[in-house]
Amino acid sequence: MERIAKFEKVSFGQFAKDWKNFFPDIPEDKLKNIYEGISLPKRATSGSAGYDLFLPCGIFLGSGEGIAIPTGIRVRITDGWALNIYPRSGLGSKFRLQLDNTVGIIDPDYYNSENEGHIMIKLTNCGGKSLSLEAGKAFVQGVFLPFGITEDDDVSAVRNGGFGSTG
């Protein structure tokens, strides 16, 4: 298999800034503990296509509730590849846990954005029962896929941000 990417943690400063956008009342010492506990994505088996991303903190979602989660993770990807993010199949089928944008697409140029390419995950519990997940639990998976461009492509714009940043 071709090795085309490397996961890293974003800086603590970037993580703290993004975390406080969604959870403004968290004490600094707790935020540092959350950051220190972040695990880089891993495949569960040698035959797995997906890299599990792990929750930096526990979450509880009632039926119909949503949450945005700053993962503390970024990924450097070789040009011509993208990381597609999906809910883990067990959580999707048992609880109808869904990504708000259906499939997250992490482009190779996102790594160099002002926010350090910080991967954010927005989820909604679309099922009829509550969902509780502990910190460190795998909750979504990322699959690297190749992509192409058209022969007459002449785009020169440069990305700077995530959700909706390219228009």
Image (tube, helix red, strand yellow):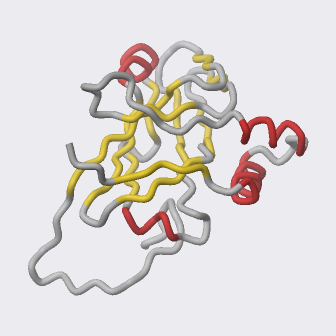
Q: Position of residue 65 (x, y in %)?
A: 60, 30
Which residue does the image show at 78% across and 51% down from the upper left? Answer: 20
Q: Quadrant of residue 116?
A: bottom right
Q: From the top left corner, tell me how far across and down residue 157 is, in percent.
A: 38, 84
Q: Is residue 104 left or right of residue 47?
A: right
| Residue at figure coordinates x 37%, y 61% from the top left | 107
For the point 89% across and 45% down, the residue is 28
31, above or below 158, in the image: above
* Quarter location, residue 67: top right
Where residue 75 appears, as percent x and y from the top left, is 46, 54
* Foreground residue among 165 and 28: 28
Total number of numbered discs in the rendering: 0
Residue 117 vs 98, above or below: the answer is below
Quadrant (top left, top right, bottom left, bottom right) of the C terminus: bottom left
At a point 56% along the width and 27% down the height, the residue shown is 64
Which residue is nearer to you in this view: 160 or 8? 8
Quadrant holding the N terminus: top left
- Name the spot of residue 131 as percent of width and height, x first: 58, 17
